[in-house]
Image (spheres, helix red, strand yellow):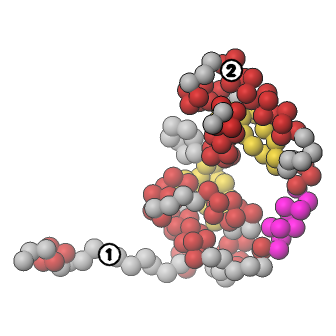
Amino acid sequence: MNRKAVLEGLLYIVGEDGLTMQQAMDSLEATEEEVSQLLEELTQEFEKEDHGIQVVNYGGTYRFVSKDEVAEPAMKLFQMNRSVTLSPAALETLAIIAYKQPITRVEIEEIRGVGCDMMLRKLLSRNLIRECGRADVPGKPYLYEVTQEFMDVFKLVSLKELPELPSYESQDSETLFDE
């Protein structure tokens, strides 16, 4: 596979986190000049009308973003999806956020055991969650919390109305394995 195709794949994989020049250089084992040339070629290729996405560089981080022409159809898509019920995975992610907020994507993924990028995007687009700041840890990841719309949809006055989580610790836990 050629390096430009690999770089395109890397940009896709990192998603909204983006890819720095140094990360691209390390991943491709290439010089800055080589990576700059590849990024320029990709940028020009995705500028063509037959692509709905483009390569951008914001603050030294390269990422794919949708073009302006995609905005209106995307809004229609997300509006259509608003009336659709939430999947079990979406409800699980939403419950984790409601009980543990503020919480980072990585913390949600640790609890769920699977990636949740797409689920977070869906919940953000439906205005059920929002970014509420950044965690004070390396990388400064976004923190998520539920919104007033979440409260309205689930008819909650306060998060204290959420049912208590069951306790999985048992007083007899020592006797389970003593045989």
Q: In the figure, 103 relative to 88: above or below? A: above
Q: In the figure, 132 relative to 150: above or below? A: above
At label 1, counting other C-alpha atoms closer than 10 Å, the crowd grade (few under 14, some 14-19, many 20 or more) is few
Residue 114 placement (x, y as % from top left): 50, 61
Seen from the viewer's position, the closer of residues 153 and 27 is: 27
Q: Main secondary structure of the magenta part?
A: helix
Residue 89 placement (x, y as % from top left): 57, 71
Residue 17 in view of the camera:
no
Type of the residue with mark 1:
Tyr
Q: Which residue is mark 2?
A: 34
Contact flag, marks 1 and 2 (Cβ < 8 Å) = no
Residue 27 included in the magenta stretch of the image = no
Residue 23 as seen in the image, left or right of residue 57: left
Identify the residue shown where x is 75% and y is 63%: 125
Q: Which residue is mark 1?
A: 168
Q: Quadrant of the C terminus?
A: bottom left
Q: Secondary structure at mark 1?
A: loop
Residue 150 placement (x, y as % from top left): 68, 72
Mark whose residue sits in front, 1 or 2: 2
Q: Quadrant of the N terminus?
A: top right
Seen from the viewer's position, the closer of residues 7 and 92 is: 7
Identify the residue shown where x is 84% and y is 61%: 74
Residue 113 as seen in the image, left or right of residue 57: left
- Magenta residues? 71-80
Identify the residue shown where x is 73% and y is 27%: 38
